[in-house]
Image: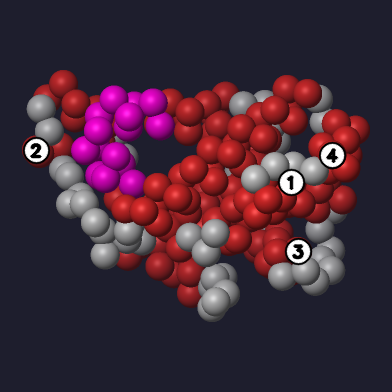
Amino acid sequence: MARLPYLEKSDLPEADQDVLNRDINLYKILAHSPNAARAFQGLGRFIRYESKLDPRLREMAILMVGYLARSPYEYSHHIKIGRDFGVSDDDIRGLIEEAEGRPSTLDPTSKLVLRAAREMTEDGSVSDATFASLENEMSREHLLDLIITIGFYNAVVRVLASTGMDVEESYMSYLDEFPLPKD
């Protein structure tokens, strides 16, 4: 249960109603601090629409963060979003295998991106070996965009957990299809 009420446009002054341009719980909580919501949304828009990082790899990294953090909100939302950007059900199954330490049939670049997401999520940093491997696979711009994406979504899952964000009913089927592990 959310620790803050979900705001609607009618709860905000007209000048701040733009922060609720999407009807999702995340924005309804962020609306408590409109300027923070704008900054948060700005980086999110860059990651999704302006970064040159391959969208499928981006979404795989985000899904790994959500999976490892056991974040039902992030994970369910990015199963849907990931599918829109080319993530297949086999990719999600492979991600789960990788997260659980089992071999998968994912391609080497996907495995490398997932390893980076795992290291940043669990250890706070990408290891030297993984960084060097990523440098061999992608440009420095892509590499930095990947690191920013993973770092941002590690922050997102902590905001979600700390505010007690509820998963909207329309996203629950994704959790049924690809459940998070029970701890």
Residue 141 vertical placement versus 1 (above, below)? above
Q: Earlier in the sequence, mark 4 or mark 1?
A: 1
Callout 1: SS: helix
Callout 4: SS: helix
Q: Position of residue 4 (x, y in %)?
A: 21, 52
Residue 133 belongs to magenta span: no
Whole-number angstrom distance, CA of label 4 to CA of label 1 = 10 Å
- Residue at image mark 3: 98
Q: Position of residue 173 (x, y in %)?
A: 44, 69
Colour treatment of the image: secondary structure
- Residue at image mark 4: 128
Name the amino acid type tagged 1: Ala
CB under 8 Å between callouts 2 and 1? no
Residue depth check, mark 2 versus mark 1: number of the one nearer the observer: 1
Q: Earlier in the sequence, mark 2 or mark 1?
A: 2
Residue depth check, mark 2 versus mark 4: number of the one nearer the observer: 4
Residue range corresponding to the magenta coloring:
26-40
- Residue at image mark 1: 116
- Residue at image mark 2: 10
Residue depth check, mark 4 versus mark 3: number of the one nearer the observer: 4
Residue 36 belongs to magenta span: yes
Name the amino acid type tagged 3: Glu
- Residue beneath the point at 15% across and 37% down: 9
CB under 8 Å between callouts 2 and 4? no
Q: Which SS type dominates the magenta stretch?
A: helix
Q: Position of residue 165 (x, y in %)?
A: 33, 56
How many numbered circles are shown? 4
Callout 2: SS: helix
Residue depth check, mark 2 versus mark 3: number of the one nearer the observer: 3
Whole-number angstrom distance, CA of label 2 to CA of label 4 = 50 Å
**In screen coordinates, is 11 left or right of 176?**
left
